[in-house]
Amino acid sequence: MPMPANATAALDARPPGVLRFGIAYREQIFHPALIQPVTAAGTFRIADDGTLIRAQEYPEPEIAEIGRDTIRLRDDLEEEANLVPIPEDIEPMLATVRALVVGEPGRILETYSVALLPHEEGWQVVVDLGNATGALTHLAVIGCGETLSAVELDLSDGGRRRIDLGRGS
Amino acid sequence: MNRNVIAMLVLSALAGLSLWAVELRADAQSIFGRGTGGVPETLENAEARQLVIAVVSPDRDERTALAHAMASMLAEERLVAAVNLGPEMPARGTIDFLWHHRFRLAPPAPEDLSVEGMVAQLHSARTALASVTGVGFGDYLLRDPTGSFARLIDGLATANTSLQSHDGVWQAQDGSAALLFVSFTTEPFDASAVIALADSIRQVGAVDGVETILLGPRVAAAEINAAMTRSSLWVSLAALGLLILWFSWALRSLRALATVMLTIALSLAAATLVVQAVFGWVHVIALGFGGALMGLAVDYPLHLMSHGRQMRREAGRLVMLGAATTAIAFLAAVSSGLQAFVQVGVFVASGLGTAAAASRWLVGGVAETPRVIRCERLLWRFPAKPMIEIAMAVAGLATVYFFSGPSPQLFALPSGLTSDIAAMRQMVSLPSGQYHLRVQGATAEEVLALQAEIAPDLDAAVATGLLGRYSMLGTFLPPASQQLTELPEAEVFAERAAAALSASGMAVQFLDTLLDAYGEAVAAPVVTPEMLQDHADLAPFAERVRFAGGHWRETVRLWEIQDPERLAAAIERPGVEFIDVSSEIADRLGSLQRHVLLGLGIGAAVAIAVLALAGDGTRRALAIGRSIAASLGLTVVILILVGGPLSVFEILALTLVVGIGIDYGIFIGFARDAETQKAAARSVGLCAISTMMAFGVMAQAPFQVLSEIGTAVSLGIGATLVISFGRTRDPGETR
């Protein structure tokens, strides 16, 4: 597959299997403590008020309503929600996922500098995290041709995450 | 040079000096004395520096946007240390601090250090990795298989409010308002600066259909202060206008009017400066008694002018005698030992001295006499006067004894403030305003140790529903003795951790990371409250234990208390006291009342004694004393039957009735012949009308303290006038 002309064109790609109610995801979490990665799966969708909903089904049910500054966490059975502020250093990851789920990846370009680079799967749009010394050390959107496949993260604790979009458990 | 012109120059100098030098204050300590923490003692501690702002609007987006705008404005304010608009992540430095000191702040129990405990914790940590928050915290949880860090973070989350938020802004639990939590800086309380800040906040929220409620000790104090000042100004201007009209008619001369007004102004300026010079500042209550001083000071020039030139010398002597005895009566307030009331005593005494001296000198240059008001016609025959007077005094004492008690509060809060408190209670779970625990020790460590001791009892009370919840530093910071829990050697930990990793199907190579993290945490120093001060997120916890009155203490806040007596019985022990704030305030007010009442009695007795020594004999002085006691008795009976227990300010106002009673008694009682008595009756009548005008206006003031003083003095003057005009015989008549 040829590389897209530029990052804007690359980010026009859509994940496969976009569902009517959102996008399925499967996340693989790698950490030095783990022999096998932890796998999580569920769906992303956007609520009417613009909140990004991450509905995790596996390994534990968890609904995360990701607002502008906070995340409201609850499991399927719990009525009371736990309110957690969004740590500044994971904001780029959540902003990127939100832009992809909304289907307006151009929003990423409004906030962050990006670079289009080749990747073993096709291409990657690497988001420039600036001089931030938070949890994230690398953030990239991976795709092949006109298909957007995953978001990859490297973490300062030696961990790594890959969120495959359009693929459920 | 005209005497009034000289007086005007002196007044200008004194007024200028007052404006430059006088520092006005309104602190509660000067009224209650330094206490033990139950009554709000000061506006300088951490709790008093808090402010809650509610932006009330049915439109959630509108109120949230206004709250954002207020937070932006407040961020630029000099007086504001911090604004909490919504949930905030602790700073990275705070998280690092908690991580390094996790074994001190949340020491692991033996079971947490067992292989089984670590397996369970590693399982939780692995599950937590999958949570959306796992990116930020997952690694910490994996590196601490003892669970200390997880417990610490959970504990912090519980300590925070349970409110919901919208768009990063806290929302009231009844969904009616957006909320902001503001902390003032440690700058000393400045009422006018706080008022200016409150106005700026309200200006941002000045949108149709939106109400902004501000609730916090400093704002409340500043607004009460401002309301009292406005009320005092209104009363002063209204009384002044009325008196000028009255004097213009009664004195018939601009020069006489100027003499009276100059006497009042000079006495007020001198009294303020004397108090400033003696104490270094002036309490608003002392200044508030400026009104009372005005009521007395106005009498002296009127008495002098009402007596013709030939009687003026004698009238001057009586004025000086009256001023001296009244000053002595007020100086008895010094015995209370409470600064605000000591200042009242010094203020009135020095003001009266100035008024008497100034009026003698100024009236010397006035030839005109006031319009004749034939008050002598009001003199009446009072049969069995001594017996009836004694009966009235006894009735007054009996009423005080049987029907009086401590008033429930020093003064009622403005209705706006009480409704704001009620509204805020619906919006946010406020701790009980009536009950709390006082934990006290010789050191901060002792306080923490006591808190660790009562924590199980408090938890049990929560479990049985006696208590909703509680909040204290000890929940977060264990005493040093508990922080130094003995932990296994690194080798033992390594053995168990390796087994736990293996049993959890995790990489055994990770053991080195766990060992490093364990070693660092074991080596961390004991955490003291001072160390928390270095972190903005934790400092509010640390500030709750403070040194006051020779002890370290914390006021432990309690929520939803169901059975105060049972809770008190379960918790109380040496160093821990269950406080019922309302009964403590009632005790203090009762004590204050007794002090002021005793001061009134001593002052009146000493004044009569001085009158006996300096006047025309013991019999006349005693007769005056009896009339004053009867006037007080009648006034007290009416006040108590109509308005309930006497307030502190009503008792203080009665001291003024004593002073006025002495004045009236001296002039009427010391009259040697019919002519002198006629002049005395006219002068006393003129004074009574003037004083009742001033205090009648004060009685209408919207501020309770002023209206109480105005009512008590007006009633007292009425009673004094009626009784002192009652004669057993005509002057010169013999028994």
Image: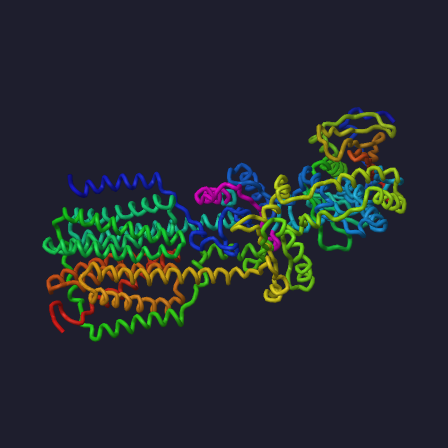
Q: Quadrant of the N terminus of chain B?
A: top left
Left/right placement of residue B131 relative to residue B614 reads right
Q: Quadrant of the C terminus of chain B?
A: bottom left
Q: Quadrant of residue A68?
A: top right
Left/right placement of residue B616 relative to residue A112 reads left
Q: Is residue B168 above or below residue A9?
A: below
Between B240 and B495, the residue placed more toward the observer is: B495
Query: Which residues, given as a range, are shown in magenta?
Result: B172-201
Q: Is residue A119 above or below residue A58?
A: above
Q: Residue B78: x percent and y percent?
A: 51, 37
Task: Answer yes or no: is residue B176 visible.
Answer: no
Between B136 and B564, the residue placed more toward the observer is: B564
**Residue at image location 41% in from the left, 54% down from the top:** B338
Q: How is the image coloured?
A: rainbow
Q: Residue B249: x percent and y percent?
A: 18, 53
Q: Residue B698: x percent and y percent?
A: 33, 56
Q: Quadrant of residue A119?
A: top right
